Image (cartoon, grey):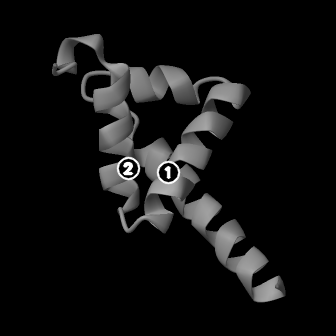
Amino acid sequence: MEDLDNVIAETKLMIRQFVDDFCNENVSFYVCQLASTEKGYEQLEQFVLQRMAKGDTIARAINLKERILDPNRLVD
């Protein structure tokens, strides 16, 4: 179980680094807004972890979250 905890902790660090590097309000306004609060960041982190469990990369998960949050990208 300790190994799993280490993997999750390392993955959370990678997510944090990616968000810090990726966050550009010209490209990812809604993800940046979400990540700007502690509660919002926790929601983003959980979303990314869940998507990674389904096989997505961090980048793919964050891009998906941006599309979900952006009302201009909604598709019927």
For the point 61% across and 47% down, the residue is 46
Q: Is residue 60 left or right of residue 73?
A: right
Q: Is residue 38 left or right of residue 71?
A: right
Q: Quadrant of residue 39?
A: top right
The 10 Å Cα crowd at callout 2, few under 14, some 14 to 19, many 20 or more, is many
74 versus 14 height, above or below: above
Residue 24 visible in the current orientation: no
Q: State the CA–CA distance, disc 2 to disc 1.
A: 5 Å
Q: Secondary structure at mark 1?
A: helix
User: Which residue is identified by label 1?
Assistant: 48
User: Which residue is identified by label 2?
Assistant: 61
Where residue 73 appears, x then y in whole percent? 19, 20
Tag 2 near tag 1, CB within 8 Å: yes
Q: Amino acid at mark 1?
A: Val
Q: Residue furthest front?
A: 76
For the point 53% across and 24% down, the residue is 34
30 versus 42 height, above or below: above
Where residue 70 appears, x then y in whole percent? 30, 18
Pick the quarter of the image with the C terminus. top left
Q: Quadrant of residue 66?
A: top left
Where residue 41 appears, x then y in whole percent? 62, 35
> Considering depth in this image, is 49 or 21 the residue closer to the camera?
49
For the point 66% across and 23% down, the residue is 37
